[in-house]
Image: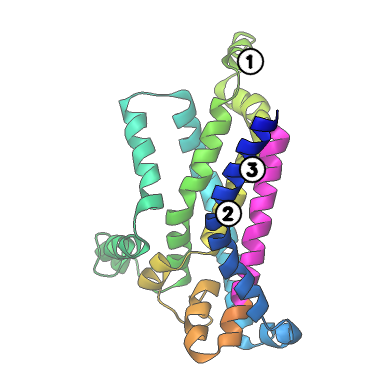
Amino acid sequence: MKSGRTTTGLWRLLSLPLLLFFLLPLVALLLRAPFDRIIESVMREQVRSAIGLSFVTTLISAAIIVVFGTPVAYLLAVRHGRIEKLIDTVIDLPTVLPPSVAGIALLLAFGRRGLLGPAFTVLGVDIAFTQVAVVLAQTFVAAPFYIKSAAIAFAGIEVDLTQAASLDGANNWDIFRHIMAPLAWAGLVSGLVMSWARALGEFGATILFAGNLQGVTQTMPLAIYIGFEANLDTAVTLSVILMGLSFSALLMAKALLNRAG
């Protein structure tokens, strides 16, 4: 027993340097935050517009991710062929791509001179450097977090339950609606929360594909970038808000997963 406690203490001691490395910048940010002027900072036009735009665009992105990502997650959970493995790799790709690469790729696909640009021009539609571009950039980088979590949740459901429902005459939609979704809800919601948090913090792809226009495409991370040069209090205030939202999202996701487990 004593040996076990000694080993645990040793591992905790070895973990300390990296934990301090993670914590010190966050503590420094909180110590620098102008809490006495937080209301004043939030009431600035640039800050209010960035916060509002971030919430609107991330909610739209989250809705798109759920609608179009759930079928992909379900497919990855129930099928394991070569095509599904390729799809799984493609889904993972945005999580390891440099944000600048993602932004350039989106611009070359949907920009005015991009792959689909001529078709959008004929329709009189501009995507690049608009709020639509913000939503697309957020969706591109954040969707994998929801899809992977949802796929794991779907895969954890006992096959016997779906087979029994099928034998009782339930169709695929009934099985999904009455069995799969209710049993996987914790994984779906936690994945959605993580995906929303990732979309909220998106910077690189957004600035290249959507630009940084105040009141139009300037989300909170982009306002931090501008505020760092023009007004440090604005940058720090938005950083603290983003950190608080991200921390809350992580706590919620972990609580849902622990509850499901």
| Residue 185, image quadrant | top right
Q: Indicate whether residue 250 is drawn in magenta.
A: yes
**Residue 157 placement (x, y as % from top left):** 60, 23
| Residue 10, image quadrant | top right
Residue placed under numbered mark 2 in the picture: 16
Magenta span of residues: 238-261
- Between residue 78 and residue 1, name the one nearer to us: 1
Say which residue appears at 64% left-offset and 30% top-offset: 177
- Badge 3, how many Cα within 10 Å: few under 14, some, many 20+? few
Tell me: residue 62, above or below residue 55. Answer: above
| Residue 17, image quadrant | bottom right
User: What is the spatial separation of the Cα atoms under label 1 and label 3, in whole angstroms?
Assistant: 44 Å
Residue 78 seen in this snapshot: yes
Quadrant of the frame with the C terminus? top right
Kindly identify the amino acid type of the residue bearing the numbered disc 1. Answer: Leu
Residue placed under numbered mark 3 in the picture: 9
- Badge 2, how many Cα within 10 Å: few under 14, some, many 20+? few
Residue 128 seen in this snapshot: no
Q: Main secondary structure of the magenta part?
A: helix
Quadrant of the frame with the N terminus? top right
Kindly identify the amino acid type of the residue bearing the numbered disc 2. Answer: Leu
**Residue 153 placement (x, y as % from top left):** 58, 32
- Which of the two discs, 2 and 3, labels the residue nearer the N terminus? 3
Say which residue appears at 57% left-offset and 77% top-offset: 50
Say which residue appears at 48% left-offset and 84% top-offset: 226
**Residue 232 placement (x, y as % from top left):** 56, 86
**Residue 204 placement (x, y as % from top left):** 40, 67
- Which of the two discs, 1 and 3, labels the residue nearer the N terminus? 3
Residue occupying the far top of the picture: 167
- Badge 1, how many Cα within 10 Å: few under 14, some, many 20+? few
Residue mark closest to the camera, 1 vs 3: 3
Residue placed under numbered mark 1 in the picture: 161
